[in-house]
Amino acid sequence: MTISEALTQLKAFARIDGAIVAALWTASFVATLLSPTSAIGSTLALATPFVVGARTISFRDHALDGVISVRRGAAHAWFTVAYASILFAVVQYAYFRFFDHGSFAAMITEAGKTLTLAYKAQGMDTKTLTESIDMLAGLTPIQYALLFMSQNLCVGTLLCLPIALVCRRSVPRRPKRNHRFNP
């Protein structure tokens, strides 16, 4: 297989896996919007490295005959996160543009009030916090989508190498034998 064919194959699998991760992030986002105090949304988001790792292992086992280098594993994980970030940004833009009507900004403002009270109780200055909350609450739908996309890309980039290290394998695993039929 040439380098070009290998990259094409990697990106094809990563696009499918990116759609799976984007679906996970969408479920996490919806759970957070429906119940901000629940841990379900956060738990789904924290499952991202495990899902990306499972998809990288699936790529390794189904497309590469059980062998994957750290470099190829990191590339698969990064492309998966990149495609998921782009798709999720489109989903978020659609939500903020057509369905939100200011409820996300209200949720940020409400959380900011709680944080401001905690800062005041500790005797800390709240001016910068208040300005930051006001700035976040005033973002446009495209700015929200790009903000989350850049965050997902940064965190995903940091996670790619550890995922690749866990998923690498230099020797293919031997297939299991069924001992009932083989004496």
Image (tube, rainbow, N blue to C red):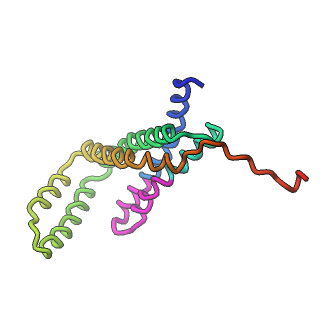
Which region of the structure is painted magenta? Answer: 26-50
106 on left or right of 14 = left
Quadrant of the rendering where the N terminus is positioned: top right
148 on left or right of 160 = left
The residue depicted at 51 percent of the width and 43 percent of the height is 17
Residue 138 vs 112, above or below: the answer is above
The residue depicted at 48 percent of the width and 49 percent of the height is 163
Q: Quadrant of residue 108?
A: bottom left
Residue 170 vs 103, above or below: the answer is above
Q: Is residue 49 magenta?
A: yes
The residue depicted at 40 percent of the width and 40 percent of the height is 82
Please, what is the dominant secondary structure of the magenta stretch? Answer: helix
- State the residue lying farthest toward the right: 183
Q: Of residues 115 and 167, which is closer to you in this image?
A: 167
Q: Of residues 180 and 43, which is closer to you in this image?
A: 180
16 on left or right of 86 = right
Q: Position of residue 154 (x, y in %)?
A: 33, 46
The residue depicted at 24 percent of the width and 44 percent of the height is 143
Q: Quadrant of residue 28?
A: bottom left
Q: Position of residue 78 (x, y in %)?
A: 43, 41
Viewer can see residue 15: no
Q: Position of residue 60 (x, y in %)?
A: 59, 42
Q: Is residue 97 magenta?
A: no
Q: Of residues 97 and 71, which is closer to you in this image?
A: 71
Viewer can see residue 17: yes
Q: Quadrant of residue 9?
A: top right
Q: Position of residue 146 (x, y in %)?
A: 29, 43
- State the residue lying farthest toward the bottom: 121
Task: Give the number of callouts.
Answer: 0
